[in-house]
Structures are given as structure tokens and as C-alpha cells.
Amino acid sequence: MTFRPIRILAVLTFGLALTLLFPGYATGQPTTDIRAKAAQLEKDLNASNQQVAALGQQLQAAQAKVDEADARVKVAQDGINRIKSMINGRAASIYKLAGAAGPFDALNAQDAQDLTTRSKYTDLANSSDESLVDQLAASRAELDKARAEVATERDAVAAAKADAESAASTQQKLLDQVKGDIEAEMRSQTASRASSARGGGPPPIGSGGAGAAAAFAQAQVGKSYCNTGARFGPDCFDCSGLTTSSWRAGGLDIPTTSGAQGSAFPHVDLGSLQPGDLITTSSWSAHVGIWVGGGYVHATSYRNNPNAVKFIGGTGSVVDAVRPS
């Protein structure tokens, strides 16, 4: 019985490639370098996930071979039982042991080639019985070989799949770290620019109610997104819930939906943004954030990110703004 082996050579080279996946990365590298490495990591992570999926299919194929081997085992075992029955029947006929167990009940498929057993049998049986014993031994040998082959193949594929899954998990953790470093770098650059503009010290956040609103929004960065009755905080926010609560902290009640907020106040030029201004990156009916100086804070449900309240530096994605008053 033979089986065509499944190819898993790609897994071996894949494991080696992972050790060279992300050389030279260190926290604090320039943002452009980190972004390039993040893009490469995402590409490699996708490849890893595809490798895991392919190995899953190979593992299913290997298990199918094990099932096929089990079916052949049953057929072989049925043949073994038939041969033993024939031997015992012949021996009983020779010795005419009426009502007694056959002298070959002790003959086991595992010790069919045992010299002592074969010697005893030869003393009692003719050449036809010896042929039956040979058939018994050959059937068992074929059975053992087939089971060992498919079990080894299946275990190799399972181990390769486990290695690929572990590598993909490591890549995902590293990618999350790199993305976190990109955000930290952006915040650092924004703070540095603002500090330089005012001659040192912490970046300005505004004064009065607008300053309090901007400060409140910044303090929520890292919290979760929700669009239920709890969307106004303090544990989670949606976009308009965050801006509403921010301006409540600044002493002003504003409308509670993004569309109404965009319609309630005068528009301002994007080059004249001040902390506390409300901004949108698409349309007022779809999204709203709050400008805090050097960038804006918003609550986003993008990809169900658990840390959905974020600071985004610059005005690159801002399309409109209004100033509550």
C-alpha cells in the first residue's frame, strides 16, 4: 500500500525567511522608514496567513489518507481473522480435539513470525498451513508500514502548520508595535513643531471653553468606540458623543449629532483652525472630530479598533470645519 506524499518543502524555507523578516527595526527610527517597514510587514503577514490556509488544506488531505489507511486496516484485519480461523480449523481437524480450543489460539498477528511459534506450528501443520502463516505475517507487515507512513506525513504537516501559525502571530504583534510607534512618532513631531513655534514648553491647547474642550478630547485618546446610550462617555464614545462631551467640559451645550453640529456654527478656513473647532474628514452627516492644535481627536469605528479614540496629526484629511460659540 503506497501513498503519494504531500509537499511541505515551502514550509521549511518559510520558517527560515521569518528569521530574516524584519531586520534592523528599532523604536525611534524616522517615520518614513517605519511606514515602509509597516507596509512590508502587512504584505508578509498576508503571505503568512495564506501559508497557514494552504497548510490547513494539506492537513485535511493528510487526514484523509489516514482515514483511507484505517479503512485498509479493517480489510487487512478481516483477512487476518479469516486466516486464523482457517488455521485453527485445520489444526482442530488434525488433532480432532472435540470440544477443545484449537492449539493455535495463542498465535497472535504480532508474533506470527516468532521462531518458537512457527516451530510449534510446523510440527503440527503441513505446507499449506505454513503458507497461511506467511500470508498472515505479510498482511500485518503491510499494515504497519502503511499506518506509519501516513501518521508521519500527517504529523509533519501538523507541525508545519503550527509553526506557520506561530510565525503569523509574531508578525501580527510586531505590526501592531510598529503601528503604535508610527502614531507615537506623529504625536512627537506635532508637539515638537508646536513647541518650536512658541519658543519651547508644551504645545498650546487653547484657552477658555475651547481650551477646556480640546483638553477633554485629548484626555480620551485610547478609549473605545461605542454607539449606544453610553456614547457620551466616560468609558467609550462615538464621534459626535466625543465632541458633545468635550464641549460640555468647555461649558457649552452643542447638538448631539454630527450633522446638526456641522450646521449649527459658522464655518472657518482650514488655515485658521483653533483648538476646540469641530472638523469633518468626509461629510458632517457621516463624521466629526475636534481640533486640538496640530491635529484633531476623533472616535472612529474603523475595523472595530478597540482603541478608537485617536489623535491624528495635521489637516491633510480635514475637509471642513466650524467654530462653536
Image (cartoon, helix red, strand yellow):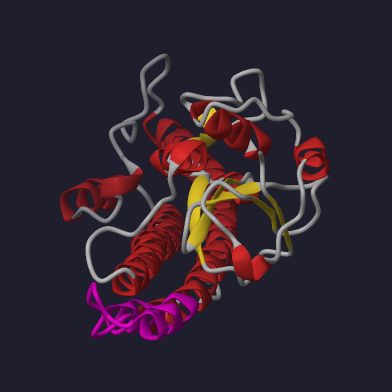
User: Picture coordinates of residue 225 (x, y %)?
Assistant: 57, 36
Q: Up-down: is 202 above or below 14?
A: above
Quarter assignment of residue 272: bottom right
User: Picture coordinates of residue 179 (x, y %)?
Assistant: 41, 65
Quarter assignment of residue 175: bottom left
Disc tally is 0
Q: Up-down: is 316 above or below 155?
A: below
Write the residue at 44% across / 84% down.
Answer: 36
User: Picture coordinates of residue 262 (x, y %)?
Assistant: 78, 45
**Residue sitting nearer the eye, 205 or 175:** 205
Q: Up-down: is 176 above or below 33?
A: above
26 vs 52, left or right, is left
Write the residue at 60% across / 55% down.
Answer: 64
Residue 274: tell me if it is visible. yes
- Please say whether residue 28 is one of the residues in the magenta stretch: yes
Q: Up-down: is 187 above or below 259?
A: below
Write the residue at 55% across / 42% down.
Answer: 78
265 vs 29, left or right, is right
Write the residue at 37% across / 63% down.
Answer: 187
169 vs 226, left or right, is left
**Residue sitting nearer the eye, 70 or 15:** 15
State the quadrant of the C terminus.
Answer: top right
Magenta highlight range: 14-39
- Please say whether residue 101 is one of the residues in the magenta stretch: no
User: Picture coordinates of residue 164 (x, y %)?
Assistant: 40, 65
**Residue sitting nearer the eye, 62 or 141:** 62
Residue 237: tell me if it is visible. no
